[in-house]
Image (cartoon, rainbow, N blue to C red):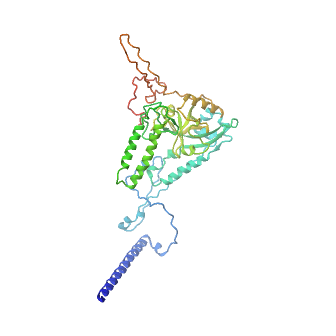
Amino acid sequence: MRKFRLRTLRWLALLLFLGLLGAIIVRWISLERLRLTMLRLGPEVVATPTPETTPAATPWRTPIIGGKLDTAKLWSGITVHAKIEPGPGGAASVERMDPESYVIDLDLKVRVPQPNETVEELAKVTPQLPKLLPGLAATFQTAAVSPLFAELYDIKVQELRENLLRLDQLLSRHNFYDCQTILQLEDPKTKRKAVLLQADMDVDADGSDSDRLPLSPGGSMNFKPFTSYRWKKKTTVPNPFLAPAEATLLRYETEFALKGLTIERNRDLRIGIARVREEVESLKAFSFLIASTDPYIVLPGIMARAKGAGQVGDYAIVAVNDQLYPAIVGDVGPRDRVGEASLRIAQEINGRATAYNRPVSELKVTYLIFPGTAEKPFGPPDLEKIGTRCEELVKEIGGASVPLHRWENLIPTPTPTPSPTPSPTATSTPSVSPTPVVSPTFAFPTPTPGESPTPTSSLIPTTSPLVSPSP
């Protein structure tokens, strides 16, 4: 018993000695590494201790950029000043292990614009505007810059901060400077309020309505069959995008039922199933505007969610060059992007406009929105009513010097085909039920001004996409 206890104590003493020796060695190695690092940084750092400062909390570790990056192509529209500052270092084997020995400092400098506040300032960019809407001068006497303008550029700057290390997602110069001003106007006599938005014009190619246009091939890579302006379906004709959405939902649900998926994949599938299921229900129940046939504009998210800045369904005027185009607010876009209209308006302004080719790149488009003028419940757009109502609203802010553009309905009401007359020699001929004739719409090529339309004999559109990308 004594021998067993003595042997146990000896083993315990040996283990304690070895543990103490290992701790001393590890401590010595860490101190030696610290000494070498301090020597490499310079003698002044070793001799003069710096006061301790509380480091700023960082939400994540500084990422290391890898791969091939062509900065000339990456920063489209962003001026890049590049220089290399070499300095003395230590041994290559040591510098290779130090992430601070090979660093790029990103310092993005951006000038936030100031809004235009007078007619004279706007006339420098759009000289035709005071002539098109002579009554605007009276409304500018009490005009005020909307606080949404400052909020818009605060959002843009915040997104630059968030994406500064994701260089391929930085806003381009074009998308950063896409808004000239946002003004709140009120006519001194009629008290009619309006919101003036000066920007460029991008193209919205979304929307679908199987009741009016059963065949809709879509418009772009980012096409969505929905618009914020919608109404209850009036027929049982299925939406052409319903079947693909149901197929996607079935694929997601089938994969989600499998076992052994990662937590991240399960989460993504759960989110995708909820999103696609909501889309399927919307496609079954509602109809939407069609960008290729309906004149509408898109409000940025910050305006659509603000009080008195315009809502979906409000009437609006688009002033470009020497023309005034009546429209409605038909969709809501990203909160930080300004200036977007339907493909119908874009191609009326510029025949070469497509979903990939904007009609106006300069800040020369004036969007005049009349808040609180939406008429509910929503329904299929009545182009004649849109034009008449916009004329009335323009008169309430001083009138226009030119008549408003008149939109032609590109989706005529289907007319039944008459039944054939029975032959006198035939004993009995069953009558043919009326079938609707699908008239050529924008799904077919639309003639440009000055060009005579080409008659189409086929009732089924070709399989070519609605909008082809520009070269």
**Residue at left 69%, top 35%?**
190
- Residue 53 percent coordinates (x, y): 52, 69
In the displayed structure, would residue 16 be above or below residue 50? Answer: below
For the C terminus, the image quarter is top left
In the displayed structure, would residue 436 be above or below residue 53? Answer: above
Q: Can residue 379 be seen in this view?
A: yes
For the N terminus, the image quarter is bottom left
Q: In which quarter of the image is residue 100?
A: bottom left
In the displayed structure, would residue 137 be above or below residue 94? Answer: above
- Residue 136 percent coordinates (x, y): 65, 36
- Residue 160 percent coordinates (x, y): 50, 52
- Furthest residue to the front? 427
Comparing 235 with 223, the one in front is 235
- Furthest residue to the bottom? 2
In this picture, residue 119 sits left or right of residue 248: right
In the displayed structure, would residue 454 be above or below residue 170? Answer: above
- Residue 324 percent coordinates (x, y): 57, 32
- Furthest residue to the right? 189
Count of numbered circles in the view: 0
Q: Is residue 205 visible?
A: no
